[in-house]
Image (cartoon, coloured by chain):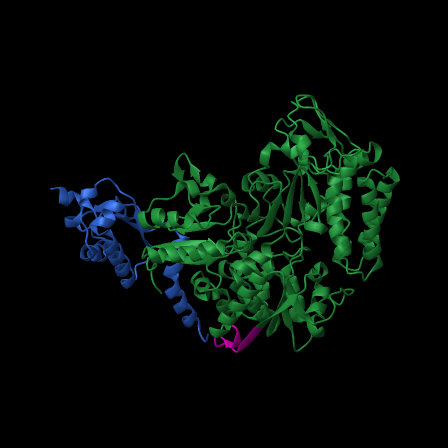
Amino acid sequence: MKSIAELNKIREEALESVNLRKDRKGTRIVVGMATCGIAAGARPVLMALLEEAKKRNVEHVMVTQTGCVGACRLEPIVEVYKEGEDKVTYVDMTAEKAKRVIADHIVNGKVVDEYTIGAYEK
Amino acid sequence: MDLFRSHVLVCAGTGCASSASMKILEKFEEVLEKNDLQKEVKVVKTGCFGLCEAGPIVIVYPEGSFYSHIKVEDVERITEEHLLKGRIVKDLLYAESIEEDKVKAIDEVGFYKKQQRVALRNCGLIDPEAIEEYIALDGYRALAKVLTEMTPEETIDVVKKSGLRGRGGGGFPSGLKWEFTAKAEGEQKYVACNADEGDPGAFMDRSVLEGDPHVIIEAMAIAGYAVGADLGYVYIRAEYPIAVQRLQIAIEQAREKGLLGKDIFGTGFNFDMEIRLGAGAFVCGEETALINSIEGKRGMPRPRPPFPAVKGVWNKPTLLNNVETYANIPQIFLRGPEWFAGIGTEKSKGTKVFALGGKIKNTGLLEIPMGTTLKEVIYEVGGGIPDGKAFKAVQTGGPSGGCIPADYIDTPIDYDNLISLGSMMGSGGMIVMDEDNCMVDIARFFLDFTVEESCGKCPPCRIGTKRMMETLDRITEGKGTLKDLDNLERLAENIKASSLCGLGQTAPNPVLSTLKHFRHEYEAHVNEKKCPAGVCQALTNFHITDDCKGCTLCKKACPVDAILGERKELHVVDTDKCIKCGACIDKCPFKAIIKK
């Protein structure tokens, strides 16, 4: 190790790997992964969320899974809990849509209205 | 590094590993692969979580779900329910983490709530065999700061200001020790780490080395810079194979990354480390005996002065600190000495790790701020005494410490308070005793240990402790006299005053403190030839009370046919035949057999 910059670089790279265990603050993205969700294709959605989150290097975001919320016909469902904001529920998700949610909602703070449950029900 | 949505932490500390936690880890890897989850869920092997009583422990993040007493068979369920479908398997959770049907995360349960983890902060959080994880949580940043921004004098000043005192037993101010070594004359100096943890029941140093080995490397490098040493020795007992192995891996990783070796951080500072294995003699925890042992000589103490700071390893000035002391160092530099000095009491700063054992619900390892009361530790962190028994005393400081009776339960724990009660901090063993413990027997147990471990160099310790032991034997056999008690006290004081090293100087403490606080128990043994707790076999007889229904279960269990009586009639114990094995007590469904 010849410089602090070198140490910081390792630190940056490794940080995400342990952040998950450190704080339960920040944004939580929850994917419905009960039988209904998995059958509707929740797995590729989840993988896309993870990949995109990593690609864009977003910090303090946790992607996790949950059981059936009861609206099985709307699966795959993705819920986003941002600190201090109302929960946003996205329905009928795909891997492509998931990438946009990360880009628009998580990174830029703009809810993708057209994917939300409110828009779908109309 | 890949991003995972979930981390499964499996405890690989010695406690859980001996309950097959490594098999659980392998099973997780296998089942995850079967479910095609290996890219989403990461399995991490970590150090001790502290609550060993609940082992083997598995923690699932991000939820922080705390699974306890996990078996290999449970792995599939956790994977299929929790990791695949997001449904926490409630019946496998640590019981206390469910309250009113709400699941609490690991840091919210009673055992962890009162704790403040400084020395143990990474234990159970990171993979001890991955240097990257240590670096991610600010590892080696303190070393970088010290090497690039501070002079050795400033470094020592920080340690002095923090008020840190040695965690190995004596509680000597660490900053002063660093200063003495720095000021000692000599070109070549060494730093050394005392990892020869020997107190029965104490395993904090072991846990730090197993769970966070890099913290010791970083702290020793800082110490090396401060005192002007380029080589560090870690003296660790060979009975700690996992700790030795992980420290070895950590040293190699640090060398690979250039955090040990030449020209660290481009500052021209060189530092490397070597491990020395001890053969497990208790006396080698004493600093001069430890130094002899590092040099390959027989581990025996020598008179001090000269202190190791002047004449240590290979007769060169040597800074010797204990594992837990070192484990505090990086945090002191990162968060500032004021932060550290803000924790604890006036004369005892920071936190202390205790190994809680004996008659207590939550057996395990805990770290609390100095000044926490014994009551808080025993009832809030420890969860109280099992089976509704009454708390009698707590033994601190292992074979060098003493017993503190229930009357002093509100005492805030710090170095000086414990000494004033006739005990000591020691390395942090804490053994809880309830009404079923005989204090004479406890004193005998610890003395038995020191008699065995006395190195034999000085007569007060070699012969004196042996004579004390014989006296105690007589008392527990009902052959003691009141004069024995006075002799015991006098002998104890003489041994304390005249022994060569800490082992002998503190060996009588368990006897002295029980004589002081529980003299009535000794007197009962001597005058009435009775053991009030029913422990000392020679003074105890078994009796069957009127609650006996004549079921004959005890009669069948008795290996020496000492129980007489027919079916449906009151049974009697033939005390001449009885060998007091207790087999009948275990069998009796009516609790009709008592010890008197």
> Quadrant of residue A47 in the image?
bottom left
Viewer can see residue B178: yes
Q: Is residue B534 above or below residue B453?
A: above
Q: Can you give x and y, in whole percent of width and height, for residue B415 in the image?
A: 66, 50
B168 lies left or right of B23: right
Identify the image quadrant of the C terminus of chain B. top right
Viewer can see residue B154: no
Front one among B494 and B281: B281
User: What residue is rendered at 35% in x and 50% in y?
Assistant: B83
Overall secondary structure of the magenta stretch?
A: strand
Chain in blue on the image: A
> Quadrant of residue A87 in the image?
top left
Chain in green on the image: B
Q: Is residue B123 above or below residue B407?
A: below
User: What residue is rendered at 63% in x and 63% in y?
Assistant: B238
Front one among B547 and B376: B547
Q: Is residue B187 above or below residue B550?
A: below
The residue furthest left is: A122
Specify the segment rendered in magenta.
B260-272
Front one among A65 and B339: A65
User: What residue is rendered at 53% in x and 50% in y?
Assistant: B50
B399 lies left or right of A14: right
Magenta stretch encompasses residue B271: yes
Magenta stretch encompasses residue B71: no
Q: How many marks?
A: 0
Identify the image quadrant of the N terminus of chain B. bottom left
Q: Can you give x and y, in whole percent of width and height, for residue B242 in the image?
A: 56, 61
Q: Can you give x and y, in whole percent of width and height, for residue B178 in the image?
A: 63, 65
Q: Can you give x and y, in whole percent of width and height, for residue B196 in the image?
A: 65, 61
